[in-house]
Amino acid sequence: MKRIGIMTSGGDAPGMNAAVRAVTRKAEHEGLEAYGINYGFAGLLAGDIFRISSVDSDDIISRGGTILYSARFPEFAEEPVQLKGIEQLKKFGIDAIIVIGGDGSYHGALRLNEHGFNAIGLPGTIDNDIPFTDFTIGFDTALNTAVESIDKLRDTAASHERTFVVEVMGRNAGDIAMWAGVASAAEDVIIPEKDFDVEAVANKLKSARARGEKHGIIVLAEGVMTAAEFADKLKPYGDFQLRATTLGHTQRGGSPTAFDRVLASRMGAYAVELLMQGKGGLAVGIQNNKLVTHNMLDLFDSKHEADMDLYKVAQDLAF
Ligand code: F6P
């Protein structure tokens, strides 16, 4: 093996650049050449591919977004499109590929593998919703962004004795909501993985007010409903001076935290080692602080599980 391709695909996530840097530098360290593929699978098809060196990746560890750009490209589900993609890789003499992204990106990587082209997946998404990994690249940064915003909302909430319903991202997973809720001492956390009772939420807000708390914060995962919809549900239960705030794509940007940079660096270097061993069809993860691999096929048969111990902590501490 001489040449490794690297792409970022799906929604961008802080730390993707750190992974690109790690792959590029590890490849060079091992006497290999790295090739960047712009715009994920869409760029692969278009042949938007270039030789990326350690010089190109010099100053990117602290940058949010992805220097390789990203795209969602459902067309890659079609076999003729996949074969055209492989043709492009061969044209550039690329022998194997590393794909950084979420679930959809892994499907693309697996298709390449089924055509005999070694591909390794790295979990890059703020949602933390990939099975068999404790953390995904970008989650920690998004979480910290959410917490910083909620701290600010609490200041204004206390000044006016208001309650904020704060909608955070996560697609169908409640991880950002749960972690952000605990870290920001929210009055309640609502996640898709657990049913909720609006009256019970309202009662928590009332008892917090009765104890003298001036602010109310409900952290809501976007997979449940919108902040405005949840505020409407709460309205009949009392005068909470409700405001609905959606944090939105601010959670996707910004300089990655040290945790995400280190995670991405470890995973990127490990992915190159796996390809050098002739392995493919694997998704890299981290469990109990050890890098692990799982067959990509197993990932599709599994579901990311919400950490119910953490959910219980959120509930036990907010009453
Ligand atoms: O998967 C990352 C994510 O930011 C989700 O949290 C969110 O639901 C979705 O992507 C938003 O997608 P888009 O950037 O296409 O609006």
Image: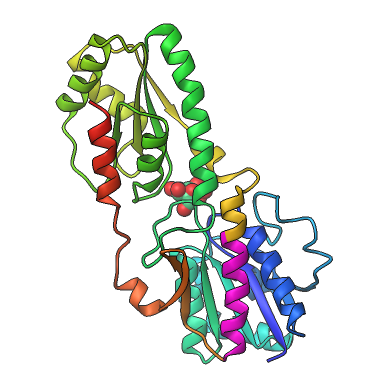
Q: Is residue 85 above or below residue 103?
A: below
Q: Quadrant of residue 190?
A: top left
Q: Residue at x 63, y 69 (%)?
A: 7
Identify which residue, 314 or 170, lies in the foreground: 314
Position of the N terminus, as image quadrant, is bottom right
Return the x and y of residue 28 as percentages of the image width and height: 77, 78
Q: Quadrant of residue 177?
A: top left
Q: Residue at x 56, y 91 (%)?
A: 278
The overriding secondary structure of the stretch rendered in magenta is helix
Q: Which residues are magenta?
A: 263-277
Q: Is residue 308 left or right of residue 78?
A: left
Q: Is residue 212 above or below residue 126?
A: above
Q: Residue at x 41, y 77 (%)?
A: 296
Q: Residue furthest right?
A: 55
Position of the C terminus, as image quadrant, is top left
Q: Is residue 188 left or right of residue 100?
A: left
Q: Is residue 267 magenta?
A: yes
Return the x and y of residue 21 as percentages of the image width and height: 71, 65
Return the x and y of residue 214 as percentages of the image width and height: 36, 11
Q: Is residue 228 above or below residue 144?
A: above
Q: Is residue 78 among the parts visible in the rendering?
A: no
Q: Is residue 26 left or right of residue 81?
A: right
Q: Is residue 85 above or below residue 8?
A: below
